[in-house]
Image (cartoon, rainbow, N blue to C red):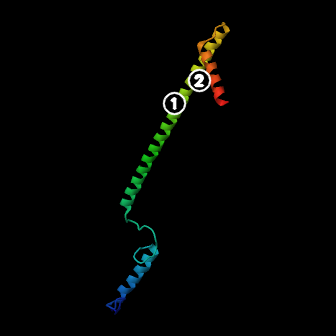
Amino acid sequence: MLLYGPNANGKLEEAGDRRCRRVDEVLARRLGSKREGTKRGRKPGRKAKSDMKAKLERSRQSARECRARKKLRYQYLEELVTNREKAVIALHRELEQYRVWSKELDEGKVPEGVLKLIEDEKVKKNEKE
């Protein structure tokens, strides 16, 4: 025997169908179906490919920026080392010049550079006063 009754829309349907639909709705809610739920967040199976593409592109962009920063950092360090090496070489030349002058002074000679250095020091001293 089939029983008929109104469904939610007011149409007549078989009572067993109504029970089945209610069971389906309860199961769907328990299983987390998105049809009637109010859960927030990304729905499974939605925009996964575009999200992965965007995520991959962000990762690639981040890697490019990281490499660029690394390159700039090494360029800065290279310039710093080069400048310091130039300063060290200049100091070595100056030290060698002083050694040569000290040897000449020990031999009793007065080097030209020493006289010029003494004159320059006198000029600087007079400018300060």
Q: Horizontal and vertical percent for residue 74?
A: 49, 37
101 with respect to 27 (left or right)? right
Could you tell me which residue is drawn at 53 percent across and 31 percent down? 83
Q: Is residue 82 above or below residue 99?
A: below
Which one is nearer the viewer's eye here, 48 or 69?
69
Upstream in sequence: badge 1 or badge 2: 1
Whole-percent x and y of residue 108?
Answer: 66, 7
Q: Is residue 126 left or right of residue 78?
A: right
State which quarter of the image contains the C terminus.
top right
Comparing labels 1 and 2, the label whose residue is closer to the camera: 2
Using the image, determine if residue 6 lies above or below residue 113. Answer: below
Q: Which residue is mark 2?
A: 91
Asked if 15 appears above or below 98 in the picture, the reply is: below
Q: Quadrant of the N terminus?
A: bottom left
Q: Residue at left 37%, top 63%?
A: 47
Which of 124 and 109 lies nearest the eye of the viewer? 124
Depth check: 112 or 43 in front?
112
- Tell which of 26 and 86 is nearer to you: 86
Task: Give the class, few, some or many, for how many residues have Cα within 10 Å of label 1's Cα (few <14, many ≥20).
Answer: few
> Mark 1 falls on what kind of element?
helix
Residue drawn at the location 44% of the way across and 47% of the way down: 65
Position of 106 compared to 10: left or right? right
Q: Which type of secondary structure does the marked residue at label 2 adopt? A: helix
- Amino acid carrying label 2: it is Leu
Number of disc labels: 2
Q: Is residue 115 left or right of residue 1?
A: right
In the figure, 88 relative to 44: above or below? Answer: above
Spatial CA span between label 1 and label 2: 14 Å
The residue indicated by pointer 1 is 82
Q: Amino acid at mark 1?
A: Thr
